[in-house]
Amino acid sequence: MTATGRKAPPGILCALITPFLDDETPDYGALGELIDFQLAGGSHGLFVLGTTGEGVLLGADERMKVAVEVMQRAAGRIPVVVHCGAPDTRTVIDLARQAEEIGADGVAVVAPYYFRYGDDALIRHFTRAAEGAPGLAHYVYENPGVAGYEAGIGVVTRLINEVPNIVGVKDTGDSIGKITQYLVQPGVRPDVYVGNNLLIFPALLLGAHGAVSALANAVPELTRAIHAAATSGSLNDARALQFDLARLHGSLEGIPYVAAVKHLVNRRGLPAGRTRGPQANVTPEQGAAIDRRLEAFPELHRWLSPA
């Protein structure tokens, strides 16, 4: 626990999308609607400016502005973790300090991308970021699919044991074995958040703290229900709900992922906005393909009715 007690809650954190206007600037009115939807749908927290939030496509000043807007519109009603990862340590520190100043509950930092770094450089990078915002809980954000490599279990374990306010990891890989390895390392047990929608139920059974879910943007009621069933011991219900989420996930296969999530949000009657270039937007043909796939699963219809 950090000195102030500010950290991410257990449960489901929505990996919040950032809605953009046609000129590719953030749509703050739409952002407020999306936050209210997450509150109504029961998400336990927000994870902003991550991969699904297209944070790395914004300049540092823009990221700070979006973080401020999120905090103002959340207004203390829901915990917020801000992704502050960047290719250079100085920018990460600046973003983390600002997140602390505006009252965020935690900071997540992905491995610095473009160049590939060894263990010692990564330890310095994450440690300096944590020291720059000492009143917040920090989370190592493992996403080798976008960073190009992973920090690794050894680096994550060392950081959690040596840096007081690095308390956990958000892992977006597809290995339940890796989730298990985090939980059995010697020393301090990390708060583990799974970032893969397909692993929420099994990760919770193993003892994960929660999940950061992109699909929660569209179906917060479903992701919240998986968590509630799994943590209350209703395992058959939790498994059936996880299968619903897996069917929804599979319906987006082959479509640019962030844009596909925004298509689902639009189906709920909410203003998802466009993506920021060079991210693709869903074409009419791709949107129709998603809708056709969803029609094959009547059990999903209750989760996708207009909000």
Image (cartoon, helix red, strand yellow):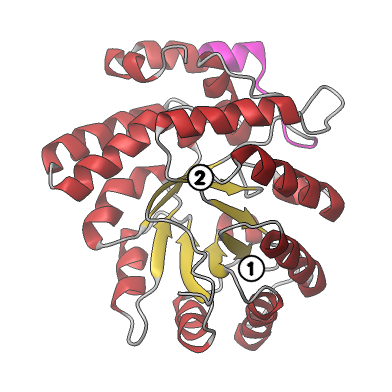
Q: Residues within 10 Å of mark 2 (few under 14, many from 20)?
A: many
* Residue 248 locus on image (x, y percent): 39, 27
Q: What secondary structure is marked by label 1?
A: loop
Mark 1 vs mark 2: which is more N-terminal? 2
Q: On the rendered structure, is 119 left or right of 245?
A: right
Q: What element carries label 2?
A: loop
In the drawing, does residue 279 fall left or right of residue 304?
right
**Label 2 sits on residue:** 78
Asked whether 36 or 216 is in front, the reply is 36
| The magenta stretch spans residue 279 | yes
Residue drawn at 67 percent across, 73 percent down? 133
Residue carrying label 1: 111
Q: How crowded is mark 1: few (under 14 residues within 10 Å), some or many (20 or more)?
A: many
Identify whether 287 is placed above or below 260. Answer: above
Q: Give the x, y percent position of residue 160.
A: 47, 80
Residue 263 location, quadrant: top right
**Which amino acid, mark 1?**
Ala
Amino acid under label 2?
Answer: Ile
Q: Is residue 227 visible?
A: yes
Task: Look at 27% across and 54% down and name the residue there.
Answer: 204
Mark 1 vs mark 2: give the one in front.
Answer: 2
Q: Quadrant of residue 100?
A: bottom right
Q: Which of 217 and 96 lies nearest the eye of the viewer?
A: 96
In x, y percent, where is residue 49? Answer: 66, 48
Span highlighted in magenta in the image: 277-289
